[in-house]
Amino acid sequence: MSSTSYIPTAVVIGGGPAGLMAAEQLAQAGVAVTVYDGMRSVGRKFLLAGRGGLNITHSEPFEQFVGRYGRSQPHLQPFLTNFGPNELRAWVHDLGIETFVGTSGRVFPAEMKAAPLLRAWLKRLRASGVQFQMQHRWLGWDEAGALRFASPDGEKFVHADAVILALGGASWPRLGSDGGWVPLLAAHGVDIAPLRPANCGFDVGWSDYFREKFAGVPVKTAVLHHQNFHQRGEFVITETGVEGSLIYAASAGLRDAIFAAGQATFTLDLLPDKSEAEIANQLAKPRGSRSLASHLQSRLHLKGAKVGLLREIVPAADFADPPKLAAAIKALPVTLTRIRPLAEAISTAGGITFAALDELLMLRALPGVFCAGEMLDWEAPTGGYLLTACFATGRAAGMGAVKWLGRN
């Protein structure tokens, strides 16, 4: 910063991890920072995401970690190199929060909760001089370049030397991320890729019987195949279709296939630890007076929702043909008819393109305006990758704003 007495000002719009991380970088550099958020308190989505155990990041090797960002890897890798999983864990530890690595390699706070981490962070931010203005919804700019906010006391106009936008995507709109920023930036010529669901569920079109019997039931230890995607895991049958970790992991390709062709089909290996020949051999053995369901359970330990899926999808005649039934068990086709609404998705794909940003994450069309977090055009699976990239881009945008202020 300049050695003169002037203290530069910055406004951060959005109080999620990306916005708060940007505010921290600015405050540490001596900038007077105010965070504005449309909700009553900051970090609402962060807190809800951590309700079942806050998955901060992942412990896998860095080369594998950055590969999880797919087509966005080249854009995100510089920010993740500077502030990746190890740096994020050290930052959490510096807040006085211990972490541990779960059996899946995912990293969690020792208490598993988001609230203690957020409380410690906000205490440190306030101690560094960061101010907060809640229930202020951003409305864009006026003709003089002032930021416009709708507040409980009416419309307000705010001037700042630098602005950080960290408004999230459009998933979970009730927590503040509703994509309302899209037309505001598009009006200024900012290139924005359409917002689409990511880490989302899909509709299948179950029969009434299957829906009533199996909605809410998990399908465990299966392998999902779709194009070049092959992964073992579990998912959940829903009233309308499927969701859960295995479905979310494959959701980008499934979503894009539905947009391209109107539907998508993946196959399930319901018994990944047995070969098709072994399964066919077991099915061919006499079952005597036992029902087919009992035969499947005793010979193959196949029961519950897996048998329900077979009954739902496989033609009845194939159950009397061991080779055909074995083939279906190893590659059961499930056709998806629709993507669940964006508001239900865990995260958002699309957003501000990286071509619209410079290396400081500043908008080329709007000098002095920086962007971070889920607003940017990237996506990643669950497992700590979403949060890590939000922290990393928030840090980069804050540091970018500091550099820009120093030059100007």
Image: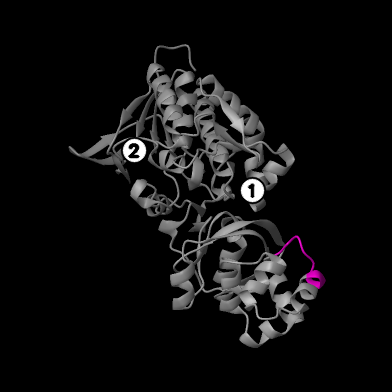
141 w.r.t. 120: above or below: below
Examine the structure image and report whether residue 364 is included in the region drawn in magenta.
no
Q: Which residue is mark 1?
A: 69
Task: Find the residue positioned furthest to the bottom.
Answer: 317
Identify the image quadrant of residue 44: top left
Where is residue 71? Give x, y as percent: 66, 53
Circle 2 — which element? loop
Q: Nearer the viewer, residue 205 or 375?
A: 205
Residue at (56% x, 34% y) in the render: 108
Q: Which residue is mark 2?
A: 37
Examine the structure image and report whether residue 274 is included in the region drawn in magenta.
yes
Circle 1 — which element? loop
Task: Report if residue 395 is visible in the image.
Answer: yes
Overall secondary structure of the magenta stretch? loop
Q: Which residues are magenta?
A: 271-278
Where is residue 404? Give x, y as percent: 51, 29
Where is residue 164? Give x, y as percent: 44, 36
Q: Are marks 1 and 2 in contact (CB under 8 Å)?
A: no
